Amino acid sequence: MTYAVELLNITKDFPGIRANDNVTVRLKQGSIHALLGENGAGKSTLMSILFGLYQPTSGTIKVNGKEVKINDPNDATQLGIGMVHQHFKLVECFTVTENIILGMEPTKFGMVDIKSAAKKIEEFSKMYGLNVDPYAKISDITVGMQQRVEILKMLYRNANILIFDEPTAVLTPQEIEDLMEIMQKLIKEGKSILLITHKLNEIKQVADECSVLRRGKYIGTVNVAETSTQQMAEMMVGREVNFKVEKGPHAPGEVVLETRHLNVKNSKGVLGLKDFNLSVRAGEIVGIAGIDGNGQEELVHALSGLTSVESGEILLKGENITHTSIRDRFDKGMGHIPEDRHKHGLILDFHLKENFIIHEYDRKPYCKNMIMQQDVMDAYADKLIEEFDVRSGEGKDSLTRSMSGGNQQKAIIAREIERSPDLLLVVQPTRGLDVGAIEYIHKRIIAERDAGKAVLLVSFELDEVLDLSDRIVVLFDGHKNGEMLAKDTDDKELGLYMSGSKKGSEDE
Amino acid sequence: MKNKDALKISLLAILFGVLLGVVILLLTGRDPFYLFYGLVRGASGLDLIKGGSINPRYIGEFIVASMPIILTGLSVAFAYRTGLFNIGAEGQLMVGACASIATAVLFPQIPVVHMLVSVLAGILAGAAWGFLPGILKSKFNLHEVVICIMMNYIGMYLANYVYVQLPGSDTSRTALIPESASLSNSFFESLTNHSRLNLGIFFVILAVLAYWFIIEKTSFGYGLRATGFNKEGARYAGMKVERNIVYSMMIAGAMAGLAGAIISLGTFNYGRVLSSFENYGFDGIAVALTGACNAIGVVLAGLLFGLLKVAQPILQSVGIPKEIGEIISAAIVLFVAMQYGIRIILNKLSKLRHKKDAKEPKGEKSV
């Protein structure tokens, strides 16, 4: 058996922490090898070592059987290693071709030769069924298409060993299907793929082998066909995992949130949410299903007060809050776990303890006569860290930026839930998080519902909407396209409503 | 950790700046010893060539030169912590100086009150000059840098106009202000061998404390820092970001206005009609950058730049062009601005050191 890549007994030490501890991963030629692990398990470190961003403390790397030293990403490219990062590295205002040739532009008489490059890209695109227009602007194409541009970038640089870092985190269900097919095609053409993910069903679907890391340690490699997702999950977190979200029967109380004929403009000045009616009752979770960009952002921003409403009303516990300030809405009993935790959820350059009091910082007990009460802040932070198990290097004094994504999200959830809001607005709460963290966050959201709070969940993960919600409202093209109880529907039916192929009732 | 890094970078930038000065002196065939001679003399009056003792007048003048740039440094730093670039400290300083002089000339001569009101007038005028760019930024999203640059010119010409209108003025300056409005203090003067050191130093100390206290200790400072780090995040959290921007520019303006008050009421005791900027505002940017927008950092950087200023005439007297002081100031700012480059070099160096440490035990044979 020949191996495309062998990472043998890799150990990587950072000051105070061993990120990889004697890890061995071998990628067979022409196969898909999944790398599974929770956030902070050391997957990214390992891949950064393979890509030349870090040097291992000890251990050896072999490519095609030969021992190599990878000093920087250029070495990796030379060896035919390419990587699709989770956050795409594309220039928005450039075309597909310009992005792909960036850094190695072909020239003709000293001028960039776009035409021949575009032709080559078109050939690749046909060969792998990528369906990319080489002259399209990046800002005009979908996220799924952008990812394919990243794939083309690797192919254009003659990469044979392809690393995919969490490739499906940003894709719609249909795009995920397409990606899986593309991966199979790549394998058929003799490429080898390392797939970093914590989505077990995707591993099951495409991967041949799966190596598991846990807290930097190498747990083992399994043959995917012979291993159940349950077993892989247990290897990953080191204990039994409960996939099925446990929740009691649906017992809705009075209406907490109501919107009436809500119209909201999007950032381009066009109505993104049209004549939208919704009610969320105490003790229920209402899920908004839909493909990204169908009015979710407009709805969430209008509810939280980040954008103003064109027309219509928002009522919170019967009170009209359509035109009140963001702060007022928090005070009147709204909690918000925002989609973008870096842009909206946290001040990344603050210490963790400062982020916990971001809504109440100028009120008692955190502040007396304009002076911040450090001891109160410290005590409150300790309490939340303990209660919500927020982990970080230096506890409450950690720089928020230095924390892992899962723990940043836990910090936001701790902050919002601790305030005990009557309405909890939850947007993409588990994006990019691992199974353990997802399980925990789902439990917390359900606990809020069981405590008689109203929860509005907006998520692009259909499974999440189906698992958590009591009632589901589908958004399509800014309209409500169907409303149903979660127990009466499934992903197939929702998919039809979400894509607009089936028309639902506008209002019951 | 972060503060330590900032300190390291500032110290390295200063070291590189001075080294560059030395290199230039060597290249132009001058003895770099005289550079240090000038700096020591400027700071203490100690004459390294002729010997002799410390002359407190030099110390006094050194502090007098440093006071306004510490304040404009605080002004720039304060705005910067809120994510704003206050390039308008120059204009704020000028209207502050003008308002103080006008009040000193026109206000009844009540002991102590006269002085306090005059200083306050300078502070308020500076705040007003900061308010305008602040409100334009928050209401209409006009960039504060553009507005501030224009406000600098308006401030200078407005001040010149007002000076000439005051009773007793000629075309280049106003009359001396009444003693009851002056910050000059005979005790400080006798202490420092007739330097111009004045009561302004108390206001500077108060301003430094206020800066530190507001930014680090108050809920207002918390809101400002949040706005500076992540405007969208602060807005989402329910903070009044627009209001914070206006307040921040006003406080920044007040600091610069105070600098103007101290210069006019303390250093000169009259208002000066100026045909061009004196660059206190730009020095403030340099001071804020070198001091990493930290209260103590700004004080130390302000003293350093003040020293480079007072050393210039001394350097000239021993045959070193006074421009060397400006070259060093400029080089320090340049090196601070290149901090990412310096950081990369630092990281490389520490890596090399790690490697050496790792190799040393094995390296016994090769040695």
Image: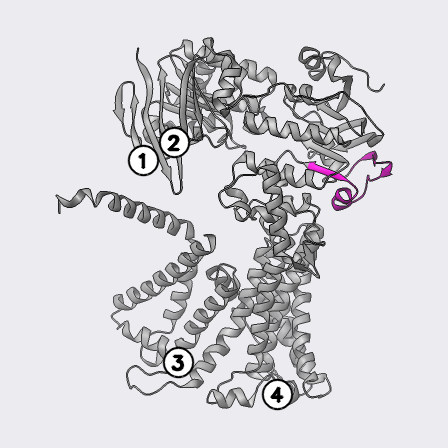
| Mark 2 or mark 4, whichever is nearer to me | 2
| Mark 3 or mark 2, whichever is nearer to me | 2
Measure the alpha-carbon separation of dots 3 and 4.
Answer: 30 Å
Q: Return the chain for callout 2.
A: A
Question: Do marks 2 and 1 share a subunit?
Answer: yes
Amino acid tagged 4:
Leu
Using the image as rendered, state which of residue A398 and residue B128 is in the foreground.
Answer: A398
Measure the alpha-carbon separation of dots 2 and 4.
Answer: 74 Å
Disc 4 vs disc 1: Cβ atoms closer than 8 Å? no
| Residues packed near mark 2 inside 10 Å, few (<14), some (14 to 19) or many (20 plus) | many
Sequence-wise, which precedes: disc 3 or disc 4?
A: 3
Residue A314 in the magenta stretch? The answer is yes
Residue occupying image coordinates x 55% and y 33%: A406
Residue B204 in the magenta stretch? The answer is no
Mark 3 sits on what residue? B44
Q: Return the chain for callout 4.
A: B
Using the image as rendered, state which of residue A115 and residue A52 is in the foreground.
Answer: A52
Q: Is residue B37 above or below residue A293?
A: below
What segment is highlighted magenta in the picture? A309-336
